[in-house]
Image: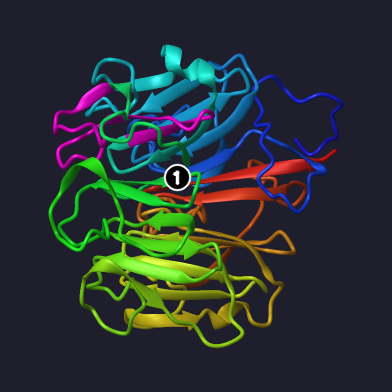
Amino acid sequence: MGQKKSKPNTNEVVEIFDDSDTNYEPCIPYACGSNLNGELSLESSKIQYRFLQINFDAIKQQVKFLRFGRGSTYVVTKNNDLYVIGRNNFGQLGLGDEVERRIFTKVENGLFSKGIKDISCGFDHVVILLQDGKVLSCGSNQVGQLCLYHNDNVNVFTEITHMITGLSFESISCGGYFTYLITTYGELYSCGQNTDGQLGLESEINRSTLKKVPIDFLVKEVRCGLNHTIILTTYNEVYVAGYNSNGQLGLGHKTNQNTFRKLEFESGITISEVFCGAVHTIFKTSNGEVYVCGGNKSGQLGMKSPDQLSPVQVKFFMKKSPIRLVNTQMSNHTVVVTQDNKMWVCGRGEDGQLGNGLDSNVEEFQLVKPSADFKIDSEKILQVMALDKATFVITGRKV
């Protein structure tokens, strides 16, 4: 893995995630955590407390990118084929049934020929963005999160067409049981569960069809937690809505919000990225600092403290190398990678998702050490994904 090669293996990941350095050839990803549904594509279905390489033997093509749901994994190849594995109790794999898969299985769907641009996963539903701006969905639909004008579960990827003729979408983001779509003009649409105001529609009524969110700013990106939503605008302003009982909206109180409220930061702080855990939120600044707010029951904020109702800086990294990567995706743990290629974890660890060999929570950031199976001493970390009960890491070797 650490040796330079003239040509990548047929099933190595080819998408470069760290845009600041394209001199690295991505390797086969690593994973740790729960493998109960086979979602990690590892030989054993037991919990994996250390990082191991994912088994891509069933995929005979170069991998373009990967996305992960709760207990399921989605792999898109350079040929725009989709391979899936893992949990399928609501038909979220899009295979036409509700049968779990233990090996990567190709999804047959003629719409994929248009090119798959992105995939976003909720807890039990999946949304696909095609290169032509159209959107497909499948899986659990009990609160309308598939945006298909009904509440029946769907086990094949189905195009979202109702009431949005002529719209073209640029970006997608799924929360626990809700969905957001951003148009090519920076407008925002949402559907699904809205019991806590997470759709930003000035109500708490669930929606089974897409509805335009009443905002007066253009959206650059949307990040969704279990029941809360964070927007980063084209001017790097932050707006928040939804569930707030743990302070995850950062507004200084615990009151839910059914419309988007602007979150103010001190002068000189520019937010470049946002990430939503299940009940906590992370803000990365343009100079590599990290601010956090929300729930901290499992230590996911990286500090020994109660829940934080307003964003506070993670001081642990103030005297360390600047932060390059950070991630949490509807989970109760956090992963940080610093410029010196060191990987730090904190939060919930009972399912092995911290990759430190233990099954306990970590209240302050802990270094994950390289090993014979996890070669981050000779490979650059390009992307990290901290999911509900698992963590995935994509590394690269020098070209």
Quick check: 302 above or below 373? Answer: below
Q: Is residue 301 visible from the viewing direction of this image?
A: yes
Horizontal and vertical percent for residue 235?
Answer: 56, 68
Q: Give the quarter of the figure containing the C terminus.
A: top right
Helix, strand or loop under label 1: strand
Q: Residues within 10 Å of mark 1 (few under 14, many from 20)?
A: some
Q: Nearer the viewer, residue 308 or 347?
A: 308
Q: Which region of the structure is painted magenta?
A: 126-155
Name the residue rendered at 27%, 38% in the picture. Answer: 124
Name the residue rendered at 57%, 18% in the picture. Answer: 57
Residue at the extreme bottom of the image, as rendered:
267
Q: Nearer the viewer, residue 396 or 38?
A: 396
Q: Give the quarter of the figure containing the N terminus.
A: top right
Toward which corner of the image does residue 74 lie, by quadrant?
Answer: top left
Quick check: 194 above or below 252? Answer: above
Q: Is residue 41 visible from the viewing direction of this image?
A: no
